[in-house]
C-alpha cells in the first residue's frame, strides 16, 4: 500500500473542496511547493496534485504551481498530476515537466482512445480518474455528469495500459462520511489495475483529536494532505506544542505508521484478517486486488 498525499490547487492556492463545491473551499495557503516538500520530508513516495481551475475550464492557470511542486518533490517523491488534462499536448507538457504520471478524467470519458495512445508512449505514466456522484462519472471539474458509470468506464479502458484508477466518491469528499468500501471493492474486483481511493472521508469514531498533544487535528485529510496542512500552515499551533509535541506527531503520523493504520481499516472493512500492531486512521491509499 502507498499513500498519495494530495495538493489541490485553486487560483494558485492550496485548498480542499467540500463535495466538489468550488464555493466551499478550505484555504491552506499559497505555498504548494513548500507543502510538497513537507510531504516528501514525511516520507511520502508520491504527491498527488490536482489543478482545480483546469479541471473546470481546461485552462491550466496553475501550471507554474504544478511545476514548482514537481521541482520540490524531485529526488524524493514522484508526482501524479490531474485536472484539465484533456488532450495529448496537455499530457505531454506535464510529463516533460517531470510529472511521473498524469490523470485523465474528462478526456477518458469523451475520448477513450486517448488513454491508449498516451499509455503506449508512456508506460505506467497514465491513470484514469473516476470521479462519481451517485454512480455517474462526473466531468469538467465535477460540474457535469457523463451518463457513464464507474464500472462502465473501467471496462472501457482497463486494457489500454492504464497504470491506475483514481476513484473519488464526490458525495463523500470532505464530509467525514467514511469511505465507500463496497464501491471501491467493486472496482477492485472488476480489474487487475491498481486502484487509488481518492479523497477518502474520515472514520469519525476512530479519528484521534488531541489538540494539545498531536499536530494532526480532526478533519478530513484529503489524501493525508489536509491533516498535515493544518499544522504546516499554522505555525502558532506548532509553537504551542513545542518540540516534544512535534516529535510525537512525527512518530505517530509518519508515512509508515499511517500506512499501517489505513491497512487495518481496509482489511477490517473487507473482512480480511487484522494486521498486527496497526490502529485505524484515514487517508488516501493505493490498494490492489
Image (cartoon, rainbow, N blue to C red):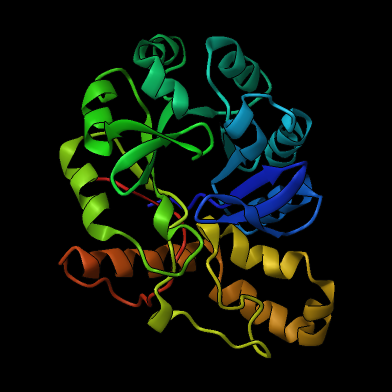
Residue 192, picture quadrant: top left
Q: Going 54% across and 46% down the picture, which residue do you hit?
A: 45
**Quarter the C terminus occupies:** top left
In the rendered image of this protein, does residue 175 appear above or below residue 108? below
Q: Going 47% across and 69% down the picture, which residue do you hit?
A: 257
In the rendered image of this protein, does residue 212 appear above or below residue 161? below
> For this rendering, which residue is in front, 114 or 261?
114
x%, y% of residue 68?
Answer: 77, 36
Q: How many discs mark residues in the rendered view?
A: 0
Q: Going 71% across and 51% down the picture, which residue do you hit?
A: 14
Residue 54, picture quadrant: top right
Q: In this view, does 243 lie to the left or right of 177?
A: right
x%, y% of residue 233?
Answer: 77, 65
Q: Going 60% across and 10% down the picture, which residue do you hit?
A: 89
> For this rendering, which residue is in front, 209 or 251?
209
> For this rendering, which residue is in front, 123 or 231?
231
Q: Looking at the image, can residue 218 be seen?
A: yes
Q: Is residue 150 left or right of residue 234?
A: left
x%, y% of residue 55?
Answer: 58, 33
In the rendered image of this protein, does residue 149 appear above or below residue 185? above
x%, y% of residue 235?
Answer: 83, 72
Q: Looking at the image, can residue 125 be seen?
A: no
Q: In this view, does 183 lie to the left or right of 10?
A: left
> For this rendering, which residue is in front, 107 or 275?
107
Amino acid at each position: 500500500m502507498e499513500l498519495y498525499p494530495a495538493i489541490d490547487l485553486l487560483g494558485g492556492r492550496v485548498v480542499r473542496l467540500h463535495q466538489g463545491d468550488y464555493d466551499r473551499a478550505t484555504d491552506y495557503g499559497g505555498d504548494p511547493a513548500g507543502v510538497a516538500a513537507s510531504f516528501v520530508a514525511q516520507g511520502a513516495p508520491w504527491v498527488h496534485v490536482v489543478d482545480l481551475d483546469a479541471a473546470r475550464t481546461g485552462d491550466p492557470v496553475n501550471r507554474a504551481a504544478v511545476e514548482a511542486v514537481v521541482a520540490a518533490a524531485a529526488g524524493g517523491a514522484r508526482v501524479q498530476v490531474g485536472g484539465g488534462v484533456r488532450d495529448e499536448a496537455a499530457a505531454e507538457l506535464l510529463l516533460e515537466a517531470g510529472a511521473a504520471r498524469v490523470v485523465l478524467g474528462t478526456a477518458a470519458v469523451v475520448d477513450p482512445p486517448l488513454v491508449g495512445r498516451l499509455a503506449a508512449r508512456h508506460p505506467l505514466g497514465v491513470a484514469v480518474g473516476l470521479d462519481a456522484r451517485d454512480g455517474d462519472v462526473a466531468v469538467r471539474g465535477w460540474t457535469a455528469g457523463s451518463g457513464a458509470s464507474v464500472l462502465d468506464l473501467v471496462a472501457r479502458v482497463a486494457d489500454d495500459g492504464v497504470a491506475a484508477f483514481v476513484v473519488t466518491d464526490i458525495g463523500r469528499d470532505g464530509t467525514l462520511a467514511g469511505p465507500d468500501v463496497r464501491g471501491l471493492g467493486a472496482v477492485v474486483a472488476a480489474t487487475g489495475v491498481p486502484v487509488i481511493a481518492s479523497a477518502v472521508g474520515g472514520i469519525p469514531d476512530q479519528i484521534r483529536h488531541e489538540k494539545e498533544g498531536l499536530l494532526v487535528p480532526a478533519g478530513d485529510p484529503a489524501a493525508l494532505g489536509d491533516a498535515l496542512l493544518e499544522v504546516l500552515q499554522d505555525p502558532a499551533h506548532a509553537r504551542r506544542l513545542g518540540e516534544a509535541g512535534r516529535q510525537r506527531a512525527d512518530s505517530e503520523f509518519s508515512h509508515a505508521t499511517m500506512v499501517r493504520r489505513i491497512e487495518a481499516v481496509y482489511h477490517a472493512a473487507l473482512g480480511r484478517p487484522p494486521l498486527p500492531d496497526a490502529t485505524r486512521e484515514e487517508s488516501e491509499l493505493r490498494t490492489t486486488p
